[in-house]
Image: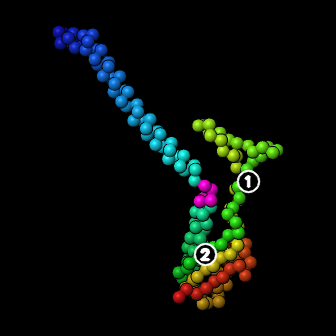
Amino acid sequence: MKRWSEVLKKENLVILLLAGILLLIIAMPVKEKEGEETETQNEKKESVPVESDVLVWQEQLQVQLQNLLMEAEGVGKTHVFITFENSGEILVEKDGEETIFEKDAKGNQTPWIAQEKYPKVSGVLVIAQGGDSPVVVQNIQEAVQALFQLEAHKIKVMKMK
């Protein structure tokens, strides 16, 4: 019993209590720094302009069309280039003359987006291994016309060397 009574003296309890508080204080800043790092990363993601999203979307559209055409019979390997009329449009919700804003948890205001329009395709160039066959060229033109509602003169299919 003497051992527990020696350990439980007031001086030892105060030292243990102070050591525990010190450990808590040391642990707190580490968690806050991690939170601050993720917040700055999120802020960087939010500050990316909308145009970069459109560019990524345009690139994905070209790759998807290229992959689809390569799957068609007789087309073979392809390269696709798509041109667009504009860079897209974002319509902001308005109440009369004033823009409606939404606030996030931090109090930042961003405009309320009512509608987002992607750019309209204005022309397509397809270079294909099977581009020398009139049947393959017609199939490619018809596929592109159906996908993008383009007129035939806005689609060019060429033979790959």
At x 70% / y 55%, what residue is drawn? Answer: 90
* Front residue (pair 98, 157): 98
Q: Residue furthest left?
A: 2
Q: Which mark is residue 81?
A: 2
Amino acid under disc 1 = Leu
Name the image quarter holding the N terminus: top left
Residue to which mark 1 is pinned: 91
Local crowd size for mark 1, using a 10 Å CA cut-off: few (<14), some (14–19), many (≥20): few
Q: Is residue 132 left or right of residue 115?
A: left
Residue under the image location 27 percent in, 10 percent down: 10
Q: Earlier in the sequence, mark 2 or mark 1?
A: 2
> Magenta span: helix, strand or loop, mainly?
helix
The part of the image, by quadrant, that contains residue 16 is top left
Residue furthest right as drawn: 96
> Given the image, on which type of amino acid does mark 2 rest?
Phe
User: Quarter of the image holding residue 51?
Assistant: bottom right
- On the image, the x and y values in percent for residue 2 come to 17, 9
Residue 120 vs residue 26: left or right?
Answer: right
6 to the left or right of 124: left
Query: Does 113 lie within the magenta span?
Result: no
Would you say residue 94 is visible in this rendering? yes
Q: Tell me the magenta residue range.
A: 49-53
SS at mark 2? strand
Residue 54: image location, x then y, percent: 62, 61
Q: Residue at x 60, y 55 (%)?
A: 49
